[in-house]
Image (cartoon, grey):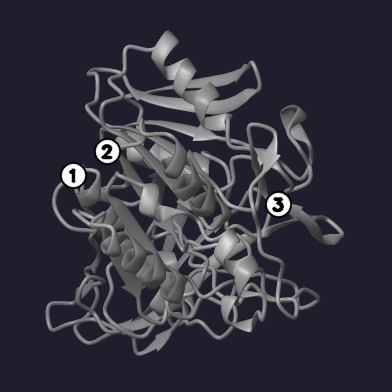
Amino acid sequence: MAYFQISAVDAMIDEAVAIELHELAPHTLAVIRAQFQDDFGHTWASQALFQSDALGKIKLQSARPQSGSYQQPDPMGLFWSMQAQTDGTENRIHRPATNSLTPLSVTLTAENNHKIIAEATLIRRFLNTAINRIDIQEDGLIATLFMPAQSIPRTTAMVFGGSGGGFTWSHQVASVLASRGCATMAIAYFDWRGEFGLPQQFTELPLECFARAHGFLTDQTDLSLNDLTAIGYSKGAELALLLATIYPEIKRVVAYVPSSLVWCGFSQQGTVSQSSWCYQSQPVPFALFANGHFDANGWQDQEMIAAAAIPVEKISAPVLLISATKDNVWPSTQMADNMLRRMKAVGRTQASKHLSLAQAGHSLSIPSLPTITYGGVEQVSNAQAERQAWVEVLHFLDLPTMFGEGI
């Protein structure tokens, strides 16, 4: 009887697993499917058709699909190539498959001649059981602290999500990094729903959010903050870079798909002629959109652009800039190049790096989650980019690249 052999049926979300289907007849065709249900009740699924080898095995790490949701050998292809299954009345879903920390229960099935011949379930976790989670709501600080239970980590990171608001992106990234040995604090600085009393409009958000978070870590934990990192995605990257220009306590910066400029704010009705950020009650200089876009090449007002530029020359910390060449939100590759060039001009590039992800789009997350793409970006390109970026981040933070080796 056919059966799945899986290297780890209960593993972290970013951990690659080896999946093999055994006890088939030699050179037999079989369809392998994967699916799970998301936080909104949608089913996400993928599938691929394989032929077994001379020993009657299909090894996903080396087998090339004959057809299906991905085309090249990839041990995690069934995971990142999942798409939401709609009833035909909806367009393809362009949002994360999950924003929570609830483990994913992924069902694998193998079919031959339209009959299920093998089945297995995998648990994919965002949070290691050895991590303590502390939810914080005090003195205007809305955050979640993730701390390894058995040791005091050397590295601490603050994690900021983008314009999705709340703990979107930041919760999952912070929890997975904590599971690799880093103390992390996911910080919510605004939310469209106004949850926890956070602002519902992305305008003049105070940069002092860092001081509140740093004060909490200093006063209420035993963590060493000598190696404090700020990690941000999109608007959160804009925030992380700005914070590093003001607060020397930040010793490293990771900026996913960053902007080199401070932009105008926005509400649910559209853009607002106010800055996204403020500091000491004063708005940070900002740039307005050009023709409805974030493209810094489209302006005639170079004085405005110069004023809105994030003063990265003031950053003394090493910076890891991660850009996407097919970013259709803003030209992150061009802007990251610009920032690295400006830092180099004042001798600030020691240990700093720009990782440009070829053919990737703006949506970048933890590897092996269903990859979200739009604007002509292919899933396989984003999946490869997410894996490459994640390994680079782990190296930058001096964390192990896997619970084993390699992702």
Residue furthest out toward the right: 269
**Element assignment for label 2:** loop
Q: Position of residue 261 (x, y in %)?
A: 55, 62
Nearest to the observer: residue 270 or residue 52: 270
Toward which corner of the image does residue 196 lie, by quadrant?
top right
Dot placed on the residue nearer the N-terminal end, 2 or 1: 2
Q: Residue at x 42, y 74 (%)?
A: 333
Marks 1 and 2: in contact by CB < 8 Å? yes
How far apart are labels 2 and 1 at the CA level? 7 Å
What residue type is disc 3 on? Ser
Relative side of 309 to 139, left or right: left
Q: How many marks?
A: 3
Toward which corner of the image does residue 244 lie, by quadrant?
top left
Residue bearing mark 1: 400
Residue furthest out toward the bottom: 66
How far apart are labels 3 and 2 at the CA level? 36 Å
Residue bearing mark 2: 180
**Element assignment for label 3:** strand
Can residue 309 be seen at all in this image of the molecule?
Answer: yes
Dot placed on the residue nearer the N-terminal end, 1 or 3: 3
Looking at the image, residue 127 lies above or below residue 404 = above
Marks 3 and 1: in contact by CB < 8 Å? no
